[in-house]
Amino acid sequence: MKYVKLLQPLASVLWGLLLAYVVYTIARLAFLAENYSFFADNLSAAHLSELLWGGLVFDTSAILYTNALWVVMMLLPVSRKENTRYHRVCRGVYWTVNMLALTVNLCDAVYFQYTLRRTTTTVFNEFQNETNLTGIFAHEALSHWYFFLLAAAVGFGLWKLYRTPALDYRTLSWKPYAVATTLSLLAFAPFCVAGMRGGWTRDIRPITISNANNYCDRPTEAGLVLNTPFSLIRTIGKNNFEVITYFQDKQELEALFNPIHRPTGQKPQRRKNVVVIIIESFGREYIGAYNRHLDGGRYQGFTPFTDSLIAHGALTFTHSYCNGRKSIDGMPSILSGIPMFVEPFFLSPYSINHVSGLADCLGSKGYQTAFFHGAERGSMGFLAFARATKFKEYYGREDFKADPRTRGDADFDGWWGISDEPFMQYYCQKMSDMPQPFMTALFTLSSHHPFRVPAAYQDVFKEENPDMPIYKVIRYTDMALQHFFASARRQPWFQNTVFAITSDHTNMAAHEEYRTDLGGFCSPVIFYDPSGEMGSGMVDAIAQQTDIMPTILEYLGYDRPYLSFGIDLLSTPADETWAVNYLNGIYQYVKHGHVLQFDGRQTVGVYSLDDRLMKHNVAGHLPQQPQMERELKAIIQQYMERMTENRLTP
């Protein structure tokens, strides 16, 4: 029995790992409670058990990765003189590592509602140039104070329940002790490696984020299966752009899909100005014109001006989608026709690829081009992308402040940049300074978290729903858009301009249909041509952000080859329009009134667009499914090959 005591270090390790599982489970339950509305409609007891069981696989990997140093420290022989101090250090390492894991999991419980995915290492590049994050974090901390209490309780329990090996080092025989701890370390090592990899056999590749879909009915549920430490670890220095060759025959591939557009040059040339307005978080749910079916037909939305524009002259598409879930996804999709697959394009290793876009194409035709964003110049990486796509000018907060026609930083919102109304007026003024024709893009910012309206409008746009603070800011931004158009109509360039209005991504959702895998991508795609030449009305067709560039170029009669993973909506028959996006390892392809979900190797779901809550999987029963699969495979292969081979230009 005396030798059994020599296994005390191993017993302490096993106990500590068990406590770590408890910490991760508490974090997952907190994540579920905070984001319950995204999972509630499909969360039976049996399926919840399946998700939690799958979570253990990813928790095991994360726990063993993060606690590897502590395990080695615990299973190394310790000298008699240093054992007390040494085990204090071990306890501190263990507590710090697991409390850090708890903290990032709880932070992601808050952030998930904006991205519908667990945070990866790209977040550090995404926000590296922001200077206002302290205020944002402080605001969220106050709003989610209960997570601090939870973390304090867990931290206290973790410290108290920790067990140091119960060995009397003063009377311990060194040789048996050293042999026992060394053998324990050697015996534990293969279990540790298997846990990190996600299995034992040689056939199992180390699990990645996409493996979470093995346990999910919907891509959104991957957020519940995964944990944030695992997502961060698995994306450190990783290139996730895997080229899968679905088609060996290049002619077959290009016949199914070719992102290179080759205009015939037979369309009439139009030297019209182009204005692209990207409104932060401007999801379709907030726009009444898209949602007459909600609330028994009583739903009015929060955008009276946008509704008026749609009703009186704008060309709009009933089933329109964004191609990503973040602001940095929206800019390449809208302005260069490049959707987000796997990771944001300009946070990937291929962000240095040669890339074109609306500014480049029209700039080569003599257009003056400029990009506008009310934040500081380095914010969100927009300046870098604007330069890469050949925008000739960039105007940000610093330029607004320096312009004598503005009130300078008196219009700073205290968080992100210049509030939308004054910055849109500045935008209008700057376009009037430009020679025609011009192509400009505006990226707004007021309808971004923490959803604050300027002080002058706080009594005008009041809180309508405490659970949906974005509503009041959407009303403010819609008003700012109205005032912009009122000013623009008085300018000499207005009648000779085509406007495109969309959002970068969607945001908070109150209605279940906008919380589904596809509902989280419902963004408006609106074109407005004051001359009426482009057409008007609500068209029963599918549209996506990547269609904006080819639609505008074809309308203008652009006659040179260009790349875009989208189509010309004006000349494509409604039943041939389509959209594509990516969520947690699943590609979603919308066409023929259905959305097909594909995991890279096989179809995992097909749902009718009329099945708004995505309840009825009709995979295997849609006649167009095989052809949709082939088309989606071609899109993916073209994207991955061109991305990795630097072929994003004609």
Image (cartoon, grey):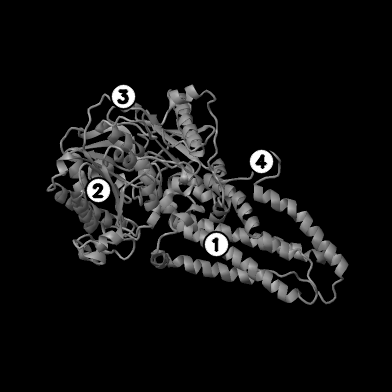
Whether residue 492 sits left or right of residue 96 in the image: it is left
Q: Earlier in the sequence, mark 3 or mark 2?
A: 3
Name the residue located 31 percent from the left edge and 31 percent from the top edge.
Answer: 568
Where disc 3 sits, the SS reads loop
Query: Which residue is denoted by mark 1 in the rendering?
Result: 102
Query: Which residue is denoted by mark 4 in the rendering?
Result: 204
Labels 4, 1: front one: 4
Going by the numbered disc 3, the residue's amino acid type is Thr
- The CA span between labels 3 and 4 is 50 Å
Would you say residue 638 is visible in this rendering? yes
Q: Earlier in the sequence, mark 1 or mark 2?
A: 1
Q: Earlier in the sequence, mark 3 or mark 4?
A: 4
Crowd class of label 3 (few under 14; some 14 to 19; many from 20; radius 10 Å) = few
Labels 3, 4: front one: 3
Query: Which residue is denoted by mark 3 in the rendering?
Result: 264
Query: Which residue is denoted by mark 2 in the rendering?
Result: 301
Q: Does the CB distance between marks 2 and 4 fall below 8 Å?
A: no
Whether residue 512 sits left or right of residue 459 in the image: it is right
Would you say residue 276 is visible in this rendering? no
Going by the numbered disc 1, the residue's amino acid type is Leu
